[in-house]
Amino acid sequence: MNALVADLRPAISRRLVRALRSIDALFLRVYGQALNPLYQSGTLAVASLLVALVTGVYLLVFYRVSAPYASIATLQGDLWIGRWVRAVHRYASDVCVLAVIAHVLKMIMGGRTWGPRMLAWLSGVALTMAVMFTGLTGLVMVWDAQAQVLAVDAVKLLDLLPILSEPLGRLFAIDRALPGSFFFMTLFLHVLTPLGGAALLWIHLSRLARPALLPPPGITKGLVASLVVISVVFPAPLLPAADMQAIPGPMPIDLPFGFWIVLSRALGPLPTLGMVALGLVAVCLVPWAVKPTRRPAPSHVDTRSCTGCTTCSLDCPYDAIRMVPRQDRREKESEMMALVNPSLCVSCGICAASCAPMGVGPGGRTGRDLMRHTEGFLHERPLLPTDVVVLTCRNGPGECGFTRDGIVIIPTECSGTVHTSQVELLLRRGAAGVCVLSCPPRDCASREGPKWLEQRMFLGREAELQERVDRRRVRVLSFSAAQGDEIVSALAAFQTEVVALARAAAEAAAQSELDAGDKRELGAADEGEPTLAECHEKAS
Amino acid sequence: MRHVSAFVFSLLLMAAIALLSRFPTQGAPPRAALRLSWKTVGHRVAVKAAEDPALPAHMRAPGGTFITHLVNYRLHVAIDGQTVADRSVKAGGLHHDRPLSVLEEVLVTPGTHPVDVSFTPDDSGEVTPNAPRYHLTQPIDFHAGRVCVVTLNEGRAALEVLP
């Protein structure tokens, strides 16, 4: 099956998957698949931003640009609400940054940075910059010792750029040099930047068919509850007021937003600016550097097979397929037909499994190609009646390399590309059962593979598994690469079930054959053939 | 049970985030600092446009029109007789037509040190006998962790130490 499921992900993606598997395993053990925050990194970032937005509105009511530190100190002194609301605001922003980092890693691990996803990547970088800038302005608004360090060091970096006629650092030379408009401007930017961020988020999600903005309610509730509890227990620190004529001593820094202070203090402004600029350029270049070893062909439509059913266009996770009126329509052909936009297609192959007549899919990976390939595989490796065939997604469970007697593994591109006819074919060719191993539903590299697979197999979604197929012999399981042991036990249980089913079926067949033989014997007794012993032998 | 353990784990993660939010950083050793900060127009020199060598010939207006240049200054700072800063200060902006800005910070060991600051026209290019010259020579008491600011009081036409 190698030609069909060649892993085109770059080496760095595979290395990252291996390196971070233990973290994935830990989170899975604690949260399970449905509540695993690692599978909700993007939506978690949005949810934490929303929490920061709501708490920010409350803080805004009490913030005074004429006395920033005093107003924050008053809030901090309000033990009942102000203190923990401020802490929730701070920690939610930190959670957002960490969720963004997790999201970036997930995208690189899934090789989801290149081609049509480039827009999402670059807008994501801009979005991250907007989040960082918003956080920075928020910390400066407090105007405590940390704010002083952040503001002074940030303008030191800016003053290195030959774009301003006089050094901005003079703003902070003495306390009274700081104009009153400074805090108004900072507040304005702190509020305005998230609005720009909303526009960037729209661009970021614009190429997704059904973007998820918020995590499941369980995760959202858990996020808010844990933020509140930790804010009550560990209120956000408020350092002494900024004093421009004091040299900042050792102090706590909000690392997610002030990580560069550590660099700046250790290396000086110029190397820090260089490292930050280089880092930014490197992140922007990821789509060109982290890309498949060869670019897979986009999907195409065999117009003669297309029935105009619209399923492929509905199932495409990237809105790359639309229905258009058919030109030169012949008799019995549908009015509409599917048309793939290659500039939006990421070649995930989901459409190949959505098409009952197998008329759409990436070049060489349509339903027909999959069937041909499965036939070839069965020709090389005939199945035994006790064999269970496991169609396993190469991105997730396929990574852990499990083996077991009686388990025949066929790697697939993604579980969402498994055509139901493939499953039926395997059962008709003698497999005791067929199991499709998918990634956890929210961790699919093709976004919606497990969802569509489940619906096609058991809920009658178009390109459905036929009624005649015994559902007891088909199983869809979702596991991560970190769950090798669980995969083996689940497969063992399924194998036991289907082998028992096969045995029962064989016994029932033998019994019915026996009964038929008895009847024939009675009918042919006068003729003296065949004998009872012969019937038994035949049945057995 | 899973929800309880997940919530407890979430609290631990949040506690880690709360710790990240107060990541300890090393401060500077207990030293004092001398900060020089001011902005001044310095000295303007009017040049007849017709005579301005910086302009191409076809742009030199004949007589009447004057173009002003800001004179470059030289900043010299010595503490305990040791030069700690000596640089030319040019007018800001792409066309060097904005005021001169000075922002300099020097770390000093705490204690009393004689400080000598001079901000004088940089005569390496042109002779400017009328340009203001500023000098400050006085012992300054530096306290650990504090910054002593020297600025230019243009009203008094003198450099002064802020209290």
Image (cartoon, coloured by chain):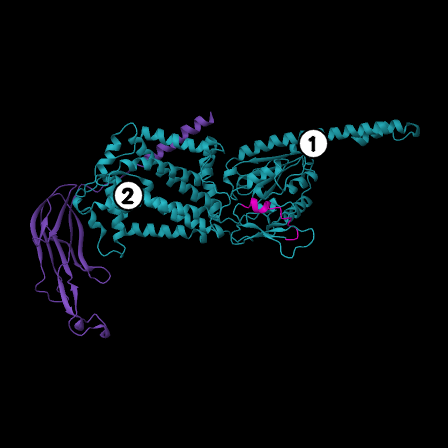
Q: Count neighbours of disc 2 (C-alpha within 10 A) and say few if under 14, some if 14 to 19, many if 20 or more.
A: many
Determine whether, in the image, residue A431 is placed left or right of residue A480.
right
B128 to A46, vertically: above or below: below
Counting the numbered discs, the total is 2
Q: Which chain is cyan?
A: A
For marks 2 and 1 on the same chain, the one whose residue lies earlier in the sequence = 2
Name the residue type under label 1: Ala
Residue A526 versus residue A23 in the image, above or below: above
**What residue type is disc 2 on?**
Leu
Quarter of the image holding residue B72? Answer: bottom left
Per the image, the residue denoted by label 2 is A187
The chief SS type of the magenta part is loop
Q: Nearer the viewer, residue A151 or A390?
A: A151
**Res. A391 in view:** yes
Dot 1: chain letter:
A
Q: Secondary structure at mark 1?
A: helix
Work out which quarter of the rendered image holds the C terminus of chain A and state it.
Answer: top right
Q: Could you tell whether A496 is left or right of A202 in the image?
A: right
Judging by the rendered image, the residue that carries numbered circle 1 is: A502
Rendering quarter of residue A381: top right
Colour chain B appears in: purple
